[in-house]
Image (cartoon, grey):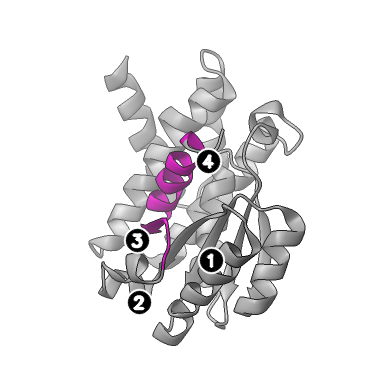
Amino acid sequence: MQQTENIQAAAFASQLLQMDRLAAEKILLHSQESNSPLQIVDNLIVPALEEIGMGWENGTVALAQVYMSSRICEELVDSFLPASSPERTSQPKMAIVLLDDYHALGKMIVYAALRASGFELQDYGRLSAEQLIKRICDDSIQVILISTLMLRSALQVKKVKAGLQAAGTKTKIIVGGAPFRFDHKLWQEVGADAMGITAGDAVKSVSDCMEGIL
């Protein structure tokens, strides 16, 4: 059974890399005959996106392919796991944000990958640390994903952490972006709860955070 799932995931990843939405959808439809929506996400979509993410890390996959693969998966998942589905609503309240930075591609990829993996979350766009603290408190966000490209922006996470602690919230902070890839201890220094290098890492980090929340 596991071998069959691995073969399907590899075939699905191949169609995503070719940006062939119809062929990818055909694989999903076939899988729906014997799997629940969440089983499809866990056994087919997430492994395929993780494989594509690793391809980008080792230089065999272009960033545009990562983004388009995530977007295709997001659209396909929305077709059989809509936002109103119980599988989505029985999750912690989550949001993603670009913290005091202007380079949004990384955030867009992670957002698409998370929704493609069955998660529902708000996109806060670009905010300063002060704006983000207020928004998290106003919306009672339990998990916040923060994307940065510049070191000065990454260091603002420490201000967000302090502000949330002062407000008495227990929001989990997951960070990602170039500064955290270059310095693997930085996420701890700024007070984050987890760090992701790839979109697949973000999916795993959210899943791990959920275990301590739900």
Q: Nearer the viewer, residue 141 or 167?
A: 167
Image label count? 4
Q: Residue furthest bottom?
A: 152
Q: Earlier in the sequence, mark 2 or mark 3?
A: 2
Identify the magenta region: 191-211
Residue with the mark numbered 2: 179
Residue flagged by tag 3: what amino acid is it? Ile
4 and 3 marks in contact (CB < 8 Å):
no
Image quarter of residue 171: bottom right
Residue flagged by tag 2: what amino acid is it? Pro
Residue with the mark numbered 1: 107
- Residue 76, image x and y in percent? 61, 40
Residue 60 shows in this picture: no
Q: Secondary structure at mark 1?
A: helix
- Look at the image and tell me in which quarter the C terminus lies: top right
Q: Is residue 22 magenta?
A: no
Q: Secondary structure at mark 3?
A: loop
Q: Earlier in the sequence, mark 4 or mark 3?
A: 4
Q: Residues within 10 Å of mark 3 (few under 14, many from 20)?
A: some
Q: Earlier in the sequence, mark 1 or mark 3?
A: 1
Mark 4, mark 2: which one is toward the viewer? 2
